[in-house]
Amino acid sequence: MRFTLDFDNSFAVRYHEGSSLFAGANTVCLANRRICVLDHLAIKLNSSRLNMVDPSRTMDVSSCRFNLSARQVVDKQNSALLLDLSNPDQKKFSICIMEAFFQENRDSYIKQVAAFQPSQDQAKGAGCESREEDTSIGARVRPLLPNEIEDGEVVGISVRPEAGYADVHELRRKINGQPTLNSSSFRLDKVYGPNQTSEDVYHGLVAPLVPWAWGGGISTLFAYGQTGSGKTYSVSELERLTAAELMNGNLEGNRDVYICAFELVGKEALDLLNDRRKIVVMEDAFGESQLVGAVEEKPSTAEELLSHIERSMSFRKTASTLKNDSSSRSHAVCRIRIANKDVIDAPDGLLFLVDLAGSEVDRDIKEHSRDRMMETRDINVSLSTLKDCIRGRAMWNMTDGVAANKRAMNVHVPFRSSVLTKVLKHVFDVKGDRYCKTAVLACIKPNAADAGPSKNTLRYAELLRVPVPKIKPASYNVNIPSTWSHHALTKWIERNSGSPIISSSLLVPTENGTQLCKLPKGEFVSRCLKTPNVSPEHARAFYDKLWRLHIDSRTARSAAPSEVSSTIASEDEASPKPTVPFQERLQPGMIVRIKRRLSTEFAQYAMILSPEGAFEKDSVNREEVMGKKRYVCAQIFGAVMADAYNLAMEAKKVIAVEDMEAEVSMEWDAPTRYWFMTI
Ligand code: ADP
Ligand code: MG
């Protein structure tokens, strides 16, 4: 057996056998002692206190002996075995010994940390660079816990919330032997200190996610950090605040809210609302990730939603007190699905709140079982894949606005590489045309002894921030919505939104073209419906019109702007409204909407083929049948995609003029081979 003592960052001593015994919150802390390394690597301690995991077992360790090769701590005076690591039932613990140098300079360290002034380089505000706006990365440094204070632990991290910095301070020995402070600064979008509440975090980081999902978009919150850094604490508080916001009735419109919660352990998914039963993550025929067998609850009040959340969390809590703390080795996902009752075919909004597995590099794999090793590997892969996915997604969000941008084509989002990102496929799949808002909360322990892991967490968080490259914004093009300013967009809406004209101040109070294209369909339609006399059909057709223009502009990215512009520009000229009622203008090829009361018998739309009786040989008969004003029509059925239709020539019906409600215009879309509603 090989043991090593690793003097890490000059003050934390770790002991590891392949991987260390660090287990986060449960820290055995030794102060004021001398360490000596004996022949078989035992540690002898003088005049010190040993605080055990269980506070009632605090004891004087002057006569205590750490026999690391036997993995035991023995009280020599009483010959009692205090701690036996070879016993699997023994609670996990870690040894975090403050080095003598740190111990001697503890007071000076505390003073220096308190007096820390950032250098000019470290002082630049986070606001002075431009950032992709749909991904925001924050950090929260929790306070020292009462038992940590009791153990004499020291705060080693300070925050500068205004500038968005977290500073990690380490004590270094200068060449002349003097102690000096070595500070590393990390800049994020938002930084919260020990005195800030979960409400602060909610308002700064999570608040924009909730209305976005309510409007039909996809929002995700990830909590990342080592075990004991406050991930579960923060996520549960944020879930509570989210539940209250979703159900308090302040958000506009009628929605049904559904919740499911599950845990990902290794490659398995376990249902947290159903006794941790196994569920299966599958991709269906449409490429959507499905959770087969997951229980989805439909709460109708904030209390009900909260009780489901509490129930799922209680599973996490009981699990974490068990022998092998599984909550540090699993990802917990709470998925809230929001179905829009006003706009039936709008895709559901999704809000994911994810409490990730502990990010510690050296996980306890005492058991060395194959399964456990695989699990550790899976966690590492999933956390690193997650980083690539979040970065990839942010880059794609940014480049998307620029149709001709090559970078957009090169973005690779490897979401299939881990179960976690596969479950979150909606969030990362750039082929799906849904825009996402993402927030990441890096959770940090304030302890000086954890400076190493805290720096890793902050470095990971910094990597997730993708700065906007300095490129010239694409110049205005009538056919590329992403180049439209707010003003140009307003003009376009006035000319193209049909009759009645959809009010641009209600649809896009501040947005520009790119922002409008990113708006979830449900939200878009709801906003259109605020204009009096606009029907849902009209609103949806208008949404499709914008979307087709947007998609065309993206696929036609390499075409010269002048070529593209001539083809569709003619649509811009408003055609004069015919004044003759449609019933008197009926002709082959015209599409009409059938009255609702007949909708069980007929499809909702039909194309006029010919008047009934037009082919009657006998002229008297012909006159008579045609006089009934009935038409042979081909029915038009809804296709699998929303707002796409199939014309079924074989499904002919005879429909009377009085059963026709209105003329509608549809357009054949060659690439998809469907008919789409136009205005
Ligand atoms: P993790 O899920 O990252 O392992 P936990 O959320 O379980 O960490 O937090 C570890 C301990 O710290 C818990 O006892 C928790 O109550 C406490 N804690 C975490 N964050 C805070 C905070 N912001 N304020 C007070 N206590 C906190
Ligand atoms: Mg946890």
Image (cartoon, rainbow, N blue to C red):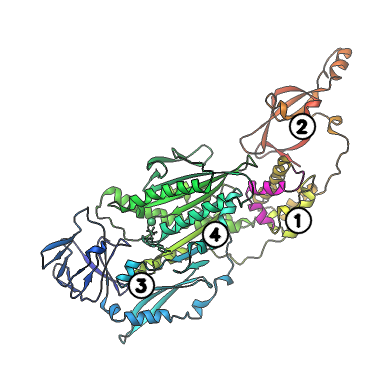
Whether residue 589 is visible? no
Spatial separation of the CA atoms under disc 1 and disc 3: 55 Å
Q: Nearer the viewer, residue 156 or 636?
A: 156
Q: Position of residue 494 (x, y in %)?
A: 79, 52
Horizontal and vertical percent for residue 643?
A: 67, 38
Mark pair 4, 2: CA separation: 45 Å
User: SS of the residue at dot 4?
Assistant: strand
N-terminal label among 1 and 2:
1
Q: CA distance from mark 1 to mark 2?
A: 30 Å
Going by the numbered disc 2, the residue's amino acid type is Val
Q: What secondary structure is the magenta-colored segment mainly?
A: helix
Q: Which residue is mark 3?
A: 448
Secondary element under disc 2, as helix, strand or loop, is strand
Tell which circle, 1 or 3, labels the residue nearer the N-terminal end.
Answer: 3
The residue tagged 4 is 135
Is disc 4 in contact with disc 2, using a CB cutoff of under 8 Å? no
Closer to us: 95 or 134: 95
